[in-house]
Amino acid sequence: MQNHYHADDVRRFLDDLVGQVAGAFAPDRPLNIVGIRTRGETLAERLAQRLRQRRFTKIGRGVLDITLYRDDLSEIGPRPLVQPTHLDIDIDGAPMVLVDDVIFTGRTVRAALNELGDFGRPSVIRLAVLADRGGRELPIQADFVALELGELPRELRVKVRLVESDGTDEIIVGPRTDK
């Protein structure tokens, strides 16, 4: 397994993800793309832009901050940083692609699904992730995956860096430094 993926790799992974999503939805029908803060938000915007280039004409965009829906909120600390959720789109009855950078235990996705339930009921929700590192604790799987890393040991971390927030596009698989 490779442990460092560079900008060209990330571009290729995103192209693959766009192809998977484009193959699953009709370009002339409504499609909401909602990113989970922080890097899922950026990836969702990139995904939406590329789908528009493929003639998807009815894309709605949204952003979720799942902080207050996490089941480990007490472990984050006394003053978690909460940013706004933006769902200024009609989600009822429309298909949705939920986007995140990495899927691990499934708890982030569970929190996102719980939050979405407070806003409405999409016709279907599909999950798109840049990387799947295995290690699920909940029965949640991504529908669209660009990079399958298999079951990584818990002491490894998958860090996605994106040019919009980090100055570069890369994925690094390495030892956890936050023990």
Image: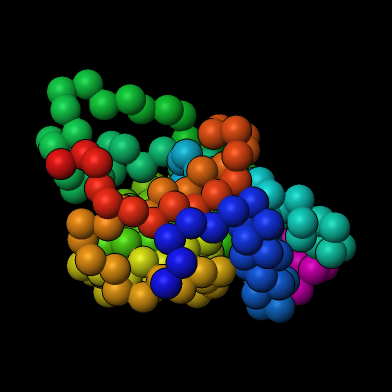
Q: Nearer the viewer, residue 171 or 58?
A: 171
Label tally: 0
Residue 4 to residue 144: above or below: above
Q: In the figure, residue 65 lies in which quadrant?
A: top left
Q: Nearer the viewer, residue 112 or 9?
A: 9
Residue 9 to residue 78: above or below: below
Q: Residue at x 81, y 62 (%)?
A: 56
Q: Residue at x 26, y 26 (%)?
A: 80
Q: Quadrant of the C terminus?
A: top left
Q: Quadrant of the N terminus?
A: bottom left
Q: Is residue 64 visible?
A: yes
Q: Residue at x 36, y 27 (%)?
A: 82
Q: Residue at x 36, y 42 (%)?
A: 66
Q: x, y (%) of residue 26?
A: 76, 73
Q: x, y (%) of residue 171?
A: 49, 53
Which span is picked out in magenta? 26-30
Task: Give the color scheme: rainbow, by chain, secondary structure or one colour.
Answer: rainbow
| Overall secondary structure of the magenta section | loop
Q: In the figure, residue 162 lies in which quadrant?
A: top right
Q: Is residue 40 visible?
A: no
Q: x, y (%) of residue 140?
A: 33, 71
Residue 86 to residue 80: above or below: below
Instruction: Tell me, yes or no, whether the highlighted magenta stretch contains residue 131.
Output: no
Q: Nearer the viewer, residue 124 or 143?
A: 143
Q: x, y (%) of residue 75?
A: 13, 37
